[in-house]
Image (spheres, rainbow, N blue to C red):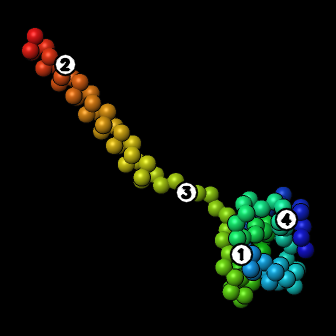
Amino acid sequence: MNNFKLKYKDHFKLYIPIENHMIFESELNRLQLPFYSNIDEQPSAGEQIRYFLRDKDRVDIDLLLKNNGIIAVIETINIVDFQKQKKIVLLVILIIVILIISIIISGYIEKIMS
C-alpha cells in the first residue's frame, strides 16, 4: 500500500536495511498499514531505505520490527551538545580576558620604563 499522500500527513520516517525491505513491505501489506517509499527519493546512497509511516501505526510497526528481527533507525534531529559549546565559549572568554590583561600590563610596564 505505497501511498504518496502519507508524506503530507502526520508521519514519521523509518530507515530499514536494504536486506530487510522485502520482508518489511510484505508485512506492512499483510497488516494493511499504509506507507510511502520511493527508491529514487532516498536521501543518500546508503544501505537503508527510508519509509514514511503514519504516526498512529507506531505500535503496530514496532511489533512488526520486533517479530521479524528487523533493526530500524528513525530519522531524528541532531541534538546540539550545549555543555560542550558552553566550555568553548568560556575558553574563548578566558583567552580574551588574558589578552586584555596582558595588554594592560605591557602598557603599564612600558609607561614605567619611559
Q: Which residue is mark 3?
A: 79
Residue at image coords 78%, 78%: 21
The residue positioned farthest toward the left in the image shown = 113
Q: Earlier in the sequence, mark 3 or mark 1?
A: 1
In this rendering, would 77 be left or right of 103? Answer: right
Kindly report the distance in space between the C-alpha atoms of the residues bearing marks 2 and 3.
Answer: 45 Å
Mark 2 or mark 4, earlier in chain: 4
Q: Residue at x 85, y 83 (%)?
A: 26
The disc, 2 or 1, on the residue closer to the chain's N-terminal end is: 1
Q: Report the front residue among 40 and 15.
A: 40
Q: Amino acid at mark 2?
A: Gly
Q: Is residue 112 left or right of residue 84?
A: left
Q: Earlier in the sequence, mark 3 or mark 4?
A: 4
**Given contact means CB atoms under 8 Å apart, are the residues at marks 2 and 4 in contact?**
no
Q: Is residue 20 visible?
A: yes
Task: Say few, some or many: other residues with alpha carbon within 10 Å of mark 2 (under 14 / 14 to 19 / 20 or more).
Answer: few
Quarter of the image where one finds residue 63: bottom right
Q: Determine which residue is flagged by label 1.
A: 17
Which label sits on residue 107? Answer: 2
Residue 82 location, x and y as percent?
Answer: 46, 52
Rounded to the nearest angstrom, the CA distance separating label 3 from label 4 is: 28 Å
- Measured in 3D between alpha carbons, the distance from the residue under mark 3 to the one under mark 1, in whole angstroms, is 24 Å
| Three-letter residue code for mark 4 | Asn
> x%, y% of residue 96?
32, 33
Q: CA distance from mark 2 to mark 4?
A: 68 Å
Which is nearer the eye, 97 or 109?
A: 109
Look at the numbered discs 4 and 1 and tell me whether their residues touch, using CB distance below 8 Å: no
**Residue identified by numbered label 4:** 38
Q: Secondary structure at mark 1?
A: strand
